[in-house]
Amino acid sequence: NKLHDFVCACNGDMSITKVDGPATCEKDECVPNPCGMGQTCNDPSQSPDSIGDFICECANGVKTTGAAATCEVDECSSTPCGDGQTCEDPDKASNSLHDFVCTCDSDKTIKKVDGPATCEKDECSGSAPCGMGQTCNDPVKSVSSIG
């Protein structure tokens, strides 16, 4: 019966062993990914003694250690809809991109998700561009991204 001939192996990876003492088992806290949708996870120290040191990072650079980050992105801040339209980002904290809605100011029922809506503009209304005694007719009222 020999002393000091026992072998320790890591439960997650039995190929990591050490004779006569505890093995150094690594634990990657990013597997499975604990961060939210669209976030990257980085575990700088995969030591079994370091728990909760993983870092979740959003595409916009927001980082949180030990928990999913809150990636609030206001997609309307870059004015993606164009003139004559209102932009709404219904859920800035959802971590989802391309969910903003463009709504035509002239007709609130015309909307488009993730891009400018095609709004109708009657160029004859309001300003009377033809002059006195003339009739204006605008047969093609559909103008994409008015402005």
Image (cartoon, helix red, strand yellow):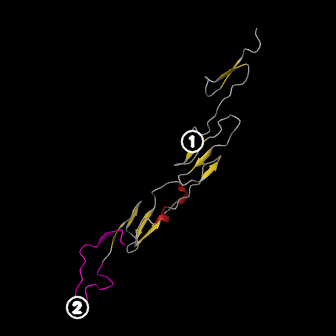
Secondary element under disc 2, as helix, strand or loop, is: loop
Q: Report the residue that reaches farthest toward the bottom.
A: 132
Residue 119, by quadrant, is bottom left
Residue 25 numbered mark, or none: none
60, above or below 134, in the image = above
Secondary element under disc 1, as helix, strand or loop, is: loop
Residue 48, by quadrant, is top right
- Find the distance from the CA under tag 1 to the CA under tag 2: 71 Å
Q: Which residues are magenta?
A: 123-147
15, above or below 46, in the image = above
124, above or below 22, in the image = below
Q: Residue 58 location, x and y as percent?
A: 55, 51
114, above or below 130, in the image = above
Main secondary structure found in the magenta portion? loop
Q: Residue 1 location, x and y as percent?
A: 76, 8
- Earlier in the chain: of badge 1 and badge 2, it is 1
Q: How many marks?
A: 2
Which residue is label 1 attached to? 33
Q: Quadrant of the C terminus?
A: bottom left
Identify the residue shown where x is 25% and y is 72%.
140
- Residue closest to the eye, 24 or 12: 24
Identify the residue shown where x is 28% and y is 84%.
129
Q: Residue 3 location, x and y as percent?
A: 77, 13
Q: Residue 70 location, x and y as percent?
A: 59, 54
Q: Amino acid at mark 1?
A: Asn
Callout 1 environment at 10 Å: few (<14), some (14 to 19), or many (20+)? Answer: some
Which residue is label 2 attached to? 133
